[in-house]
Amino acid sequence: MLTIGRIRLRLAAIVVLGCASAFPLCTVAQDQPQGPVTISLTEAIHRAQQNEPLFATVAGMQKSAAIDSYIAKAALLPSAVYHNQMIYTQPNGKTDTGPQGSPQELPIFIANNGVHEYVSQASITETIGLKQVEDARLASANAARASAELEIARRGLVAAVVGLYYAVSDAESKQQLLANSLKEAQSFTSVTEKREAAREIAHADVVKAELQQQQKQRDLNDAIVVAERARLELGVLLFPDPRTPYKTIPPDTASPLPARDEVDRLASANNPEIRSALADLRAGNAGVASARAAYLPDLGLNFSYGIDAPQVAKRGPDDVLNLGYSITGTLDIPVWDWFSTQKRVKQSEIRRDIAKVNLTAAQRRIIAALGENYAEASMARNQLTLLDQSVKTAAESLRLIKLRYSAGESTALEVVDAQNAYLAAETAQADGIVRYQVALADLQILTGTL
């Protein structure tokens, strides 16, 4: 017989093996919250920035460009190394008076200073030339352009998240509207069946009401699928498991539209496309200067301090000083390179001219986009009042027609048309709210406030 302790051990082993065989499922189940979490638009943007691989790639490129800029600037400063070396060369059998004044075996290789040579020196090297300075400027411009490209990628991601976020809200609103419309159709079907039983209307009214109810049911089923698809598309950006239940915050219709002057000021001062084009132009100018710098000489300086002697000691035989320093200066003057420098200058000038065209094009695009987005937001804002009035009018029309139908003064077709008109007005109102919020978000993205 199994004891209680053994039974517990076996149960524990089964649980461990079950989780080990399906570890991803166990992990997902533990990570999922108990109920749906409420996700604001700001939190959705933050989550998407952490999960989107393309944005992570651009962010990594920006960090790499910043490191390249640091390395290029560091190349302008002197570099120091501590050099240690031991050289042994086979002697050739002859002796001579060495640098220290004492007899010394001669090495078989004439390039070496002695049979035994020990080098232990601190060496400081500096290269002075215009090319190094322009390369540092080029790297700084590339880093600035990478930062601007990162902001462009961020705003593009924000625009995608905004569209998906409000698409979820719009799909859920339409789903609720269709559910209410289905209840209205069911109620009207019940009314027609009762009136038919009382021999007040013909059976055709019941058939019309049933057809309307069936159509509403199909529309609701389609809306449920659309809402679930929208939720999954947004969930891919927000959660490790896109099936994680969550709720969005309904759009706020009271969000004010900023003044046009303020929008123009923010857009002109904080636009990554313009910054990227300007950085590209600075990089082009630095590239031209760097290519032209190849016509100029480079001055190399070297300072070494330490030992380069047959002994690893501060002083050698006869108290000869081994520890000392040396200074070297080298001036390299370019003479002939088969016009390679000229071609590189021409190539860099072509890139610079392209950057100028891109800058002017970016300026034109931002002006056009600003006007289009502000006009869209203003139009959507103004239509909200009209949409509210349309919903109220359609609701009143449906109420009156239903009263007339109850009094026998209206037909079932008129009731069905009024129901469809009311649903169309409510749907247009939901679309109008989302349209305004998306247009406002696009304007905020353009000005850098979102």
Image (tube, helix red, strand yellow):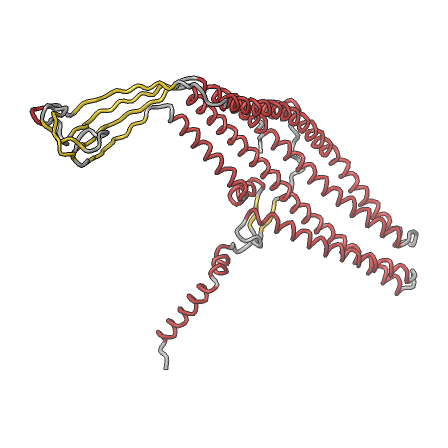
Q: Is residue 286 visible?
A: no
Q: Is residue 341 visible?
A: yes
Q: Is residue 421 above or below residue 190?
A: above
- At horizontal 36% and vertical 75% (from top left) the residue drawn is 6
In the picture, the quarter occupied by the C terminus is top right
- At horizontal 16% and vertical 35% (from top left) the residue drawn is 91
The number of numbered discs placed on residues in the rendered structure image is: 0
Direction from residue 395 to residue 326 in the image, left or right: left
Q: Is residue 348 above or below residue 183?
A: above
Direction from residue 434 to residue 155 in the image, left or right: left
- At horizontal 51% and vertical 40% (from top left) the residue drawn is 57
Closest to the observer: 165 or 278? Answer: 278
In the picture, the quarter occupied by the N terminus is bottom left
Image x and y of residue 380, in percent: 72, 34
Closest to the observer: 302 or 213? Answer: 302
Direction from residue 64 to residue 362 in the image, left or right: right
Image x and y of residue 108, in percent: 19, 33
Image x and y of residue 314, in percent: 13, 27
- At horizontal 87% and vertical 49% (from top left) the residue drawn is 401
